[in-house]
Image (spheres, helix red, strand yellow):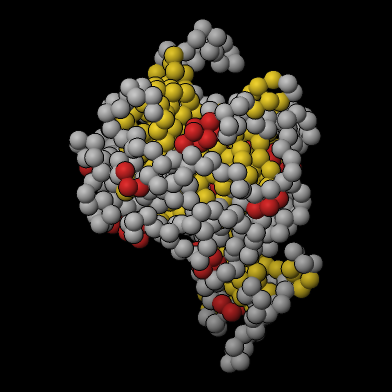
Amino acid sequence: MNKKLVICYLVLLMALPVIAAPPSKAPVGGKATALDTGTYIDVNQIMMLVSNDGAFATDLGGLFGRVDGFYFPYSGVDRINSGQETRTVIYAAGLWMGAVDADTDDTLICLAEYSEEYGPGPMTADGSFQPDAFENPAYKVYKIYSDSLEDNPNLDYTNWPADQGAPVDSLGKPAILGDQMLWTVCNDADATLHTNNSGKTDPMGLEVQQTTFGFDRTGSLSQIVFIKFKLINKGGRNLKDAYVSLWSDPDLGDAGDDLVGCDTNLSIGYCYNANDDDGTYGSRPPAVGFDFFQGPLVPATPGDTLDDGTPMVAIMWGDSIPGFVNMGMTRFAKYINGTDPQNKTETYNYMQGLLADGSPYIYDGQPTTYYGTGDPVADEGDLDDDAADRRFMVTTGPFDFGPGDSTEIITAIVVGWGANRLNSITLMKQIDESAQRTYEKFFNPPPPPMKPIVSVTELDQRITLQWTDTSEIDQGVATFEGYTVYQGETPSGPWTMLANYDVVNGIMGIADTFYNAVLQELVPVVVKEGTDTGIKRYFSTTKDAINSADLYNNTRYYFKVEAYSYDPTRPRGEQTLTSQMIVTGIPQSPPASTMLHNTFGDILEVAHVGGSNGSVEPHVVDPAALTGHNYQVVFTTYQPDTTITIECWQDTTFYYTYDTLLD
């Protein structure tokens, strides 16, 4: 008869940077005080403010006492409010559009920069600005969540503004993208708002419906925020040679050491640090990019094919449109603080990929509409130099935009944070590829395992983590494989691996394939270091792995438990899917009135009752859970060659009995 060891664990149940100097942001005509400037997306490592006047990634209302509005890495608004987190990569950003009135030949501009030429709300049926736009509380930024179901609604879900153009599903319910979504609408019909020197033209008659969304995931999706714009020509003008730009003042930590560039293959413009010594991010400055996934439709040509030779098709409103293709980034321009466009002509020139005076940008003796197309990682090609406070414009166009026309622009902001400034560019481009795949799947990425539910026990110079089997039960689209435990320098990392517990199945080190921008080829990258030693759902330590020291009492430490699944048949970059829970632990001595009779790792004695030859070995994980109670463990059937693990609570004495022991 086989003899088995039954292990029983005692656990306790859920017990100031250099910045730009933009024009004044004083309210225009006193109206800006009525704007919605305090709503933000914060579903992952990015926190970005969004207002209802075309501006985003900027703190128009001084919600956090500064202007920067794009925090990375984000780990909670409380840390921003308390001043513990001040790292930002964007100072301001907004949607710009320029075009020529085909009937008058006038150049028209509408923009959101340091003052905004859009006002809140939709336009009226006759193409006018809503008379109550600045007083109507319904013209705001709405925020809903993927679990905002009818049995768990928030007010924005309940009051979803379908009458303003907010997207709905076939049942008329809010149509959410991602795990968190913001929606708002603005327009440029109020002539009194067109006061920015870079614009200052008559209104175009443009309505902008903006959807901002992201995913609560680990990996690449945690460093991406998507933005979709629906543009509608409601002003009755026949617009030609129209351009749409994502404008940004990207202060990457400190503003004075920024460089910019673009990658025409990825359709992305980006900002990176000039050295590995940023005043805010130190030796590991990130890189941030703006990508155009989907621009306006243009007719396809016979040469417009995919890599496999099949004809390209456009995507618009979630449908495939044969015979057309989407424009991507067709222009990329930059200028520095102090050379901002001073009139509509200079702005329109920048949008066309020209210099402010209308002359072409020349590289290697040839005119081009793209600035900085070189590869900083390989140190070749057209590279930005003489680092300073940059602004840039990622632009798509030209296209015609007649009365009643509409188009859908889909973009993303991606952040790469690597070992140094150049590695951050490489990672940013890899993350952008992941964003592209998510777009191509109509924003339905494969689900990872459910998050592990983690509890923390704080002992004298010791932290113990325990988690449930939630991730194993709901494993997502792939097969559950294991858990990885990390310690972080901050709640958002960087992270140091402490332990890995994975299923005993012969799968240990897991590699996935990613594109290497330096080698310009696909290379395998180890993403998980398994041990094939079996699953555990607890971890305890007395060591600070970040500082190579003991844990100190009354000191805050950050830990992450990551569940992962694995399917080698899935597309590259998606073979290993992860979810995580981040927790905080503060080691501390027990209260003076508490007497602990055991320590972590003790093995308790068991009184054997019954005739089986099995054994139970209770290990103490949480000494504070021992309360003097007696418990009996009973097995009615037993399958040989398996290990039975039982988690018990508040036990000091154990009894176990086998009614049947199977051969």
Residue 472 showing in the rendered view: no
Nearest to the observer: residue 648 or residue 204: 204
Q: In which quarter of the image is residue 334?
A: top right
Q: Residue 176 appears at what percent x and percent y? A: 36, 43
Identify which residue is drawn at 48% across, 25% down: 397
Q: Is residue 516 toward the left or the right of residue 30 in the image?
A: right
Nearest to the observer: residue 5 or residue 652: 652
Identify which residue is drawn at 43% across, 59% down: 26
Q: Residue 192 appears at what percent x and percent y? A: 32, 47
Nearest to the observer: residue 595 or residue 548: 548
Position above or below: 94 against 100: below
Q: Which residue lies furthest to the left in this view?
A: 125
Identify which residue is drawn at 62% across, 88% down: 595
Q: Is residue 111 toward the left or the right of residue 131 in the image?
A: right
Position above or below: 157 against 544: above
Residue 137 showing in the rendered view: yes
Q: Residue 316 appears at what percent x and percent y? A: 39, 26
